Amino acid sequence: MIEAGLPIGRVARQAGVGVQTVRYYERRGLLAAPARRPSGQRVYEPGVVDRLRTVKQAQRVGFTLAEIADLLRLSGGRGQGATTLGDRLRAKIAEIDGRIAALQAMRDALEAALHADCDSLTHCADPSCPFWTGAASAAGERPAG
């Protein structure tokens, strides 16, 4: 009979996640299947709380659950795992830098549209506006802007 260990509710509370999150991570293979009491209740080892916190932190810095599962598999041993982790971190930084650049370009376009002072997305008289297509002028319509 298994008496030691933590019930799922306590694990969830200590890790700052919901019970369904614990179950989901278990199904995804991020957590080892826990022992069970005769009643069927899951009983987790205390180290699972740290693992859950690690998974949540990895999500907060931009890793997907699939990427996290892969990184956790690589974490089993030392040596090449550190190099692989470094490579993965560099790749994630590059990905985030790309997103930041794309977001900055979007922001710049919105800023230009704001300063163009157009009345609508479809009728803009300012060629510097990112929404300006020139279609109204080509069709002989008088653009509103």
Image (spheres, rainbow, N blue to C red):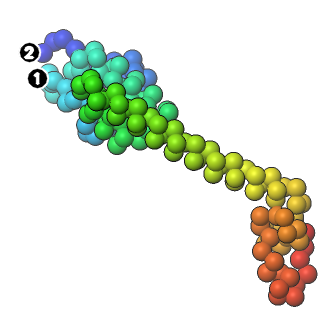
**Residue at image point 25% right, 37% down:** 29
Rendering quarter of residue 47: top left
Is residue 96 rendered to the left or right of residue 26?
right
Q: Is residue 128 visible?
A: yes
Image position, residue 15 (x, y; %): 39, 21
What's the mark number on residue 2? none
Indicate the secondary structure of the residue bearing disc 2.
Answer: loop
Rendering quarter of residue 128: bottom right
Q: Residues within 10 Å of mark 1 (few under 14, many from 20)?
A: few
Front-lying residue, 66 or 33? 66
Q: Residues within 10 Å of mark 2 (few under 14, many from 20)?
A: few
Image position, residue 52 (x, y; %): 36, 26
State the quadrant of the C terminus: bottom right
**Residue at image point 77% right, 67% down:** 131
Q: In the current view of this chain or complex, which residue is farthest to the left?
A: 1
Q: Tags 1 and 2 in contact by the CB under 8 Å rule?
A: yes
Front-lying residue, 107 or 123? 107
The total number of labels drawn is 2
Upstream in sequence: badge 1 or badge 2: 2
**Residue behind mark 2:** 1
State the quadrant of the N terminus: top left
Which residue type carries mark 2? Met
Q: Is residue 42 above or below residue 95?
A: above
Q: Is residue 35 above or below residue 121?
A: above
Which residue type carries mark 1? Pro
Image position, residue 37 (x, y; %): 14, 21
**Residue behind mark 1:** 38
